[in-house]
Image (cartoon, rainbow, N blue to C red):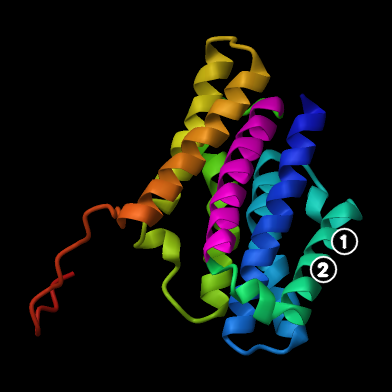
């Protein structure tokens, strides 16, 4: 099971890094900026999760495979951006896959560290959305996860499947696959049909009540 979690984490690192790097290319950042976005998108959520569960130093900062993966993804996006840009829709699919595997792997790792089944899905969700939030903050825009396409909800749903499976003592591999599939399917459906959670109504002009 630990091997499965590691492989999911590495897959999520690559697809998130590629997604973040491509966004940097679209914003016409230089190579350093593209690599910073690749690192932030791929690693911020996992680093924060590891710090919260006491897994120090975080895997993304001491296992050579993580920097090798996000640096490679950043260089690929920078060098072959015109070709990758034509794959815009597949990149969005990869981003959905990264969200799913990070949320599920993060939940599995939190449960393995002794975190309870109520808190573990929250940490799994944080693993999935943390990198995207930091990426958007670095680009000076409202984080996508706060206003669009069931991003956080999809991550929490997939993470919750893993927690429920742990409570019921179900076989871990099928439960992990089910969690990834649910999160991935919800995210793709939200992209396809433009699903959003209800948004707050805009306050009338001049209304300073807080």
Q: Nearer the viewer, residue 32 or 90?
A: 90
Answer whether residue 17 is visible to the viewer in this image: yes
Kindly identify which numbered label has been placed on residue 68: 1
In the image: residue 98, left or right of residue 6 = left
Q: Is residue 148 left or right of residue 187?
A: left
Residue 103 part of the magenta segment: yes
Extreme residue in the top direction: 169
Which residue occupies the extreme right position in the image?
Answer: 64
Residue at image coords 31%, 53%: 193
Please give the name of the residue rendered at 45% of the width and 78% of the height, measured from the top-left corner.
Answer: 141
In the rendered structure, are the residues bearing label 1 and label 2 in contact, judged by CB atoms less than 8 Å apart?
A: yes
Query: Left of 140 or right of it: where is 58?
Result: right
Magenta span: chief secondary structure: helix
Element at label 1: helix
Please identify the quadrant where the C terminus is shown. bottom left
Q: Within 10 Å of the Cα at label 2, are there few (<14), some (14-19), or many (20+) other Cα atoms?
A: many
Residue found 52% across the figure and 74% down from its top: 137
The residue segment tinted magenta is 89-112
Residue 120 point in image, percent of width and height: 56, 33
Tell me if 92 is positioned left or right of 207 in this view. right
In the image, residue 20 lies at what x, y percent?
63, 69
Residue 139 falls in which quadrant of the image? bottom right
Residue 120 in sight: no
Location of mark 2 (residue): 71
- Please tell me which residue lies in front, 7 or 139: 7
Which quadrant, please, contains the N terminus? top right
Q: Looking at the picture, does residue 72 appear above or below residue 33? A: above
Q: CA distance from mark 1 to mark 2?
A: 5 Å
């Amino acid at each position: 099971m630990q091997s499965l979690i590691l492989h999911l984490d590495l897959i999520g690192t690559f697809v998130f890094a590629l997604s973040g790097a491509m966004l940097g290319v679209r914003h016409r950042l230089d190579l350093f900026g593209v690599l910073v976005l690749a690192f932030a998108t791929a690693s911020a959520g996992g680093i924060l999760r590891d710090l919260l569960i006491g897994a120090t130093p975080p895997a993304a900062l001491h296992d050579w495979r993580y920097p090798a993966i996000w640096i490679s993804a950043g260089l690929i996006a920078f060098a072959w951006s015109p070709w990758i840009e034509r794959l815009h829709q597949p990149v969005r699919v990869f981003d959905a896959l990264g969200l799913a595997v990070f949320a599920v792997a993060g939940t599995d790792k939190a449960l393995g560290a002794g975190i309870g089944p109520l808190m573990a899905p929250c940490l799994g969700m944080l693993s999935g959305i943390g990198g995207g939030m930091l990426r958007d903050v670095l680009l000076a825009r409202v984080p996508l996860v706060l206003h669009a396409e069931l991003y956080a909800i999809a991550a929490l749903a997939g993470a919750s499947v893993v927690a429920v499976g742990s409570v019921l003592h179900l076989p871990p591999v099928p439960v992990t696959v089910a969690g990834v599939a649910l999160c991935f399917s919800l995210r793709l459906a939200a992209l396809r049909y433009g699903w959003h959670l209800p948004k707050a109504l805009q306050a009338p002009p001049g209304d300073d009540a807080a």
